[in-house]
Amino acid sequence: MSYREIDLMKKILCLTLLCALLPSTSFATETPLINGANTAWILTATALVLFMTLPGLALFYGGLVKSRNVLSILMQCFAIAGISSVFWLAIGYSLSFNGDGAIIGNFSKALFNGVTEGSVSGDIPEPLFALFQMTFAVITPALIIGAFAERIKFSAVLLFTVLWLAFVYAPVTHWVWGGGWLQSMGLLDFAGGTVVHVTAGVAALVTAIMIGPRKSFVRGNTAPHNMTMTITGAGMLWVGWFGFNGGSALAANGDAAMAMLVTHISAATGALTWMFYEWKKYGKPTALGTVTGMVAGLGTITPASGSVGPAGALIIGLLAGIVCFNATLLIKQKYKIDDSLDVFPVHGVGGILGTFLVGIFASENLGVFSGQGFADGISSMAEQVGVQIVGIGSTFIYTAIVTYLIFKVVGMITNGVRVSEDEEAQGLDIVDHEERGYDL
Amino acid sequence: MKLITAVIKPFKLDDVRESLSEIGVYGLTVTEVKGFGRQKGHTELYRGAEYVVDFLPKVKIETAVSDERVDDAVEAIIKAANTSKIGDGKIFITNIEQTIRIRTGETGPDAL
């Protein structure tokens, strides 16, 4: 064969291949395209959000309790990760994100029915979107355990988690993110100020009041057993939150970058504010205060992270430190409510504050403090703030009532949610799990 | 024979050990203990809540010496453990009825 002939054959071969490819090319335009960059980022963000619970929150909470209860906290976090994931697969995802109802979704995607390798949500694979949201459903009930730490039965935690996810988390997620009534109204909640932090915080307040204070709280002896563990976990929360807020853009773009930036600024400012405030008020800057301010800054920026700018985040972090600090004193010292690990004053109050403030700092007319604008169809700050207040109020009231009912039911089924006085003194590690966190 | 029991500040342990070695006292039992005396406890601050810690960490050392060496040993401990601040600790001296070295069966001052 001459060179010319070979060249001709090559051209023919190329044309044949091209023809063979053509039908599939035209077919591809009919199926939604998956964006590789966005997919890669959300895969990463999903891992970061799970990392917040395991082991971030587990260590953060674990260090704050007595050494006789440390394992019970770690264990509850792991068990909740398991049970919430299975719940999300079974009905949680479908109830939250499927269906056109204003209040709740439907069961058509139960057991991830129809969530296949090829199905798409936006421009990322639907299995990935469902998994990303699953990690949110894991951390939200895990946040609540700080309220009844050191005195609740393990069985009660498991039962409460399932019922609470079904009757509080899934509906509220649907209202805000799944096409429900608050989303239709134009509520700005980028990464879960209402869905995660207000629900978890209010549930913590209600359950803490219902279960009553720890014996050690009454005696005034609730100092943490391992601050090193707590601060290690807090560091993981800060890093993981990049996935929580940055991932909520559901894309690898400017929204994600800005969300991550404002998240970081608010965490830094919240930490510093609490530190200096405590230093001024009590004479010493404490490590626990600093990391608590950081978590407050992170919780508060969460709903706002998709709508505000860096300078706005500075103010949000500052206010988070001041408001959450005072809320903690108010709940624990003044009202003597043993929300043991301060879930409501830090997450609940932070979530409320952030959801409110996004109504202000989303505005494009605040100079350097401007954000990315109000929700579609909303033109004024007053209107946006109004919607935000409706979002906060409805989430607060609904969560409070339903959590109360659920905790009552759990109490009936488990013959009282609380362990006996002797068992409390002995510690949940031995009583609930027949293990010890430490054998030193 | 006397048993000298001293409760001292934990960070003074190395100084006391060296001081006792210098005068030829080589046997020492050390226990980490907690307690309070005139120093009382201290306060700790967690998220704005103050906790009073009643029992402070101390180190208890025990050493057995022959009668004629008691004064030297006590002096060595005092010299090393004294910071002139409240909370330096205390020394107790008690009689020992008998001492037996397990390996050899020796008794009395020879066993020290």
Image (cartoon, helix red, strand yellow):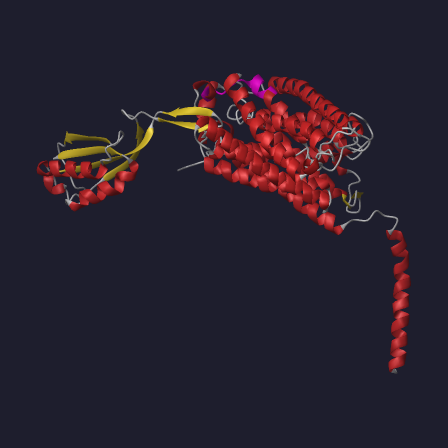
Task: Farthest residue to the left: give it.
Answer: B68
Give the side of residue A275 with respect to residue A255, left or right. Answer: left
Position of the C terminus of chain A, as image quadrant, is: top left
Q: Is residue B104 above or below residue A349?
A: below
Does residue A416 appear in the picture of this structure? Answer: no
Q: How many marks?
A: 0
Quadrant in which residue A425 is drawn: top left
Position of the N terminus of chain A, as image quadrant, is: bottom right
Q: Is residue A142 magenta?
A: no
Q: Front-most of A81 and A269?
A: A269
Q: Is residue A406 above or below residue B80?
A: above
Q: Front-most of A184 and A42?
A: A184
Give the residue drawn at x 80%, y 33%. Answer: A376
Give the residue drawn at x 26%, y 40%. Answer: B13
Range of magenta residues: A206-216
Task: Farthest residue to the front: give it.
Answer: A367
Q: Front-most of A159 and B41?
A: B41
Percent coordinates x, y for residue A147 in the rendering: 56, 25
Percent coordinates x, y for residue A273 in the rendering: 54, 33
Give the side of residue B100 with respect to residue A138, left or right. Answer: left
Percent coordinates x, y for residue A204 in the rendering: 60, 24
Magenta segment main secondary structure: helix
Give the side of residue B19 with respect to residue A346, left or right. Answer: left
Quadrant in which residue A397 is drawn: top right
Percent coordinates x, y for residue A128 in the rendering: 72, 43
Does residue A369 appear in the picture of this structure? Answer: yes
Give the side of residue A163 with respect to residue A15, left or right. Answer: left
Give the residue drawn at x 59%, y 32%. Answer: A318
Task: Farthest residue to the bottom: give it.
Answer: A2
